[in-house]
Image (cartoon, helix red, strand yellow):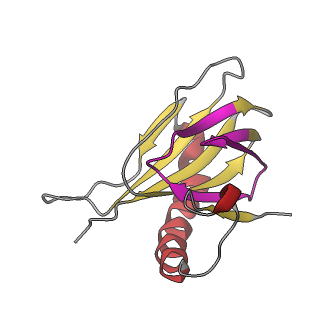
Amino acid sequence: MPQCLIVDSASENGASRNHSYRWLYGVLGLYAAAFLVYAETWAFTFDEGYHLLAAQRGPRKAFEPFLVTLSDASEVFPGFQHPGTEFIYLLSGSLTYRHGSHSYPLAPGDSLSFRGEVPHGPETLGKVPIRMLSIIIYDDAP
């Protein structure tokens, strides 16, 4: 069964919190729905890697949506850190995703939302190829 987990680095032991994130669900829901249709239709044409799905003009960006495709199960991934909140939605495959000192097994339909300042990234790849949407929402956006 698909699950959504919000990881708040300020909460004790990475516990899930579902209050004060309603705005995030609304914004991410709109972006995810649009990009999910796009990704499901066109993702088979993308090679491995991170592909930016939309770009904003202007001095500051509010969000960055990526389609991520991973197919080498033996690849070692660096830890990522960046400002803002990241939302990932697994389209296909399976993996274990690390956020700080916690690891989360993800299957198609699962999602994870977390603060980008905490080191994070794929820990181990299960069933490949893996396709996921990764949307970064920047806190200081206009």
Q: Is residue 116 above or below residue 47?
A: below
Q: Which residue ends up furthest to the left in the rendered image? A: 59
| Residue drawn at x 74%, y 59% as measured from the top left | 109
Q: Nearer the viewer, residue 33 or 15?
A: 15
Q: Position of residue 88 (x, y in %)?
A: 58, 54
Q: Which residue ends up furthest to the right in the rendered image? A: 1
Question: Is 74 contained in the magenta span?
Answer: no
**Splitting the image into 4 quarters, where does residue 139 fall?**
bottom left
Q: Position of residue 104 (x, y in %)?
A: 74, 47
Magenta span: predominant SS is strand
Left or right: residue 64 versus residue 12 is: left
Q: Where, quadrant-wise, is the C terminus in this rendering?
A: bottom left
Q: Where, quadrant-wise, is the N terminus in this rendering?
A: bottom right
Question: Is 113 contained in the magenta span?
Answer: yes
**Splitting the image into 4 quarters, where does residue 64 fall?**
bottom left
| Residue drawn at x 66%, y 27% as measured from the top left | 71
